[in-house]
Image (tube, coloured by chain):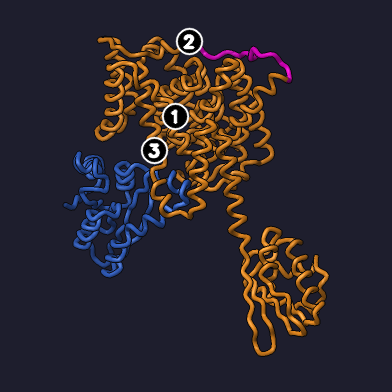
Amino acid sequence: MIEKFKREWLTSPGTNIMAGIVVALALIPEAIAFSIIAGVDPMVGLYASFLIAVIISLVGGRPAMISAATGAVALLVVPLVREYGVEYLFAATILMGVIQIILGIFKVGKLLKFIPNSVMIGFVNALAIMIFMAQLQHIFGISFDTYIYVAITIAILYLLPKFLKKIPAPLVALVVLTACYIFFGAEVRTVGDLGSIEKSLPSFIIPDVPFTLETLKIIFPYSLSMAIVGLVESLLTARIVDNATDTYSSKNKESRGQGIANFVTGFFGGMGGCAMIGQSVINVKSGATTRLSTFTAGAVLMLLIIVFGDLVVQIPMPILAGIMVVVTISTFDWKTFKYMKAAPRTDVFVMLLTVGIILVTDNLAVGVIAGVFFSAIFFATKISKVKVTSKLTENHYIFLFEGQIFFASIDTMIEQIEFKQYDKDIRLDFSQAHLWDDSAVDAIDTMVRKFEDKGNTVYVDKLNADSRKIVKELSQLNEQHLT
Amino acid sequence: MYKSILLAADGSNNSFRAAEETLNFINETAKVTILNVIQIEKSKDAILHGENTIQEQKVKLSDIIELYEENNVDYNVVFERGIPDETVVKVSNSGDYGIVILGNRGLNALQGMMMGSVSYKVAKRANIPVLIVK
């Protein structure tokens, strides 16, 4: 226990604190940008990022992973905030946490295995496209100065890391260009035009919503979507961090941790969040291995807001938009185009379908569920192809079965059999097949009976061990049929 | 002669030239460790596309491995995840090696334009002799 605590918190603290600081600096523009996407005050995203990072560092399953307010969740709640206001968002965040805790207790982390890569790629790409689209309104049709600020921001973000690796480029863009704006002025919108910054710690609140069934009806669909999307992105990120650090982490503990973090955050005026791929990669790249890095990221973020809050409202929006454009470009999976050429067509279809549904419904959760549904159907179709070939040898008439025999495949199997055989020695060869359920066993019983009705002698041949076992348990065939 | 040589290799032509040069520095007792750094960003591809990163990197290093097999070099391959320059420096300074050898330009074209930054960083910060092969 103490051993584990030491390893997860106290291993090379200096490196982890430094990594946390780097992440905190990168989190600030994102937290503000995601708040603006959701249509709430920047403080809602900043409080959320502070709380979620700090809480997940204590109760999460994956050390060194960064969780905070995210675009995926922000995009989901836009209609809720627009129609009902921010208090409903807090309530929805609390319920999101409850759902995630329940899913975590029921070990739903394992279910994520059933999300195929095609759906995950679609999810990541749709997320990138949606955040990108959300930036366009802050870039186009505002002023000439806006274009200049965006262009310089993007240039800094791409060129600076080639010379200067230690200081995060987004921070340099933010500080240098905000200073430019403060000294020289420009015709741009600022964070202050879209909300206010409070230089104080978040405090406990009970969301100001009526505690009625009506409210529950309003928030539940949002909470469910938020919970699903949060877990999908968190567990995807956890697997990436597992891979990057050559370690394993508990996905169920992470699910519960995400739930606790969101539950608490809702009570302190924050919006829901989850793990972030980009920030976690930055953290691990900076050498982070422990929970201390995540804790530092949250704590330093809050400290910076309390100290520099007055300056934050002066940040020109085009800088944030430029930073977010670069973030989405690195979020997008550029291997997708190679994937579309190489992967099976059904996988590519599922990937495009996932992206399409998400972009049409504006809901990442719906896209993931639809993607999983279609890939399951494709899988069942693909696997339910059974091939039956027949051949006549000197003494026997042999039917060779190839494929997976189960409820979905027995019809195609039986259709291929010519039952008009009389007084023959028939062998059903299952050496290339596997029987999976009682429907399969029933089908074999039926075939045997049909042949025997016409005076044939039937042998069920070469069942593999598993198939033989269920035939023995479920079938009416007797020993002499089985060879 | 060095007993223990570290060869930092990314699988590029330059790293192959460095591998060839290594042959001039060894005798029967020398051991060469081929260090390949896997970048953290690779993990995203590994998960999203089910790629086996180590397997892929091995393919990239196959020319070097073949060269060493032909010349009966006592070698082993080590994979480390991290930022290339920092990781090479860290392993160089681990105390296990007498010299680090690397090519002067890696795979990243943009970084190459700004001069081979990995070799520059390693030359600056490694505590053991550094041989940069042009």
Q: Which residue is mark 2?
A: A198
Can marks 1 and 3 be said to lie on one chain?
A: yes
Q: Is A85 displayed left or right of A454 in the figure?
A: left
Residue matched to label 3: A285
Asked if residue A135 lies in the magenta stretch, the reply is: no
| Residue corresponding to mark 1 | A131
The quarter in which the C terminus of chain A is drawn is: bottom right
What residue lies at 65% left-to-right and 84% top-to-bottom?
A: A392
Q: Nearer the viewer, mark 1 or mark 2?
A: 1
Alpha carbon distance from label 3 to label 2? 32 Å
Q: Which chain is orange?
A: A
Residue A115 place in picture, x, y as percent: 57, 45
- Chain letter of the residue beneath label 2 in the structure image: A
Amino acid type of disc 1? Ile
Q: Is residue A203 magenta?
A: yes
Name above or below for residue A388 compared with residue A166.
below
Chain letter for the residue marked with disc 3 in the picture: A
CB contact under 8 Å: marks 1 and 2: no
Q: Give the alpha-carbon distance from disc 1 to disc 2, as whole Å.
A: 26 Å
Q: Which residues are magenta?
A: A200-213
Q: Looking at the rendering, in which quadrant would you find the N terminus of chain A?
A: top right
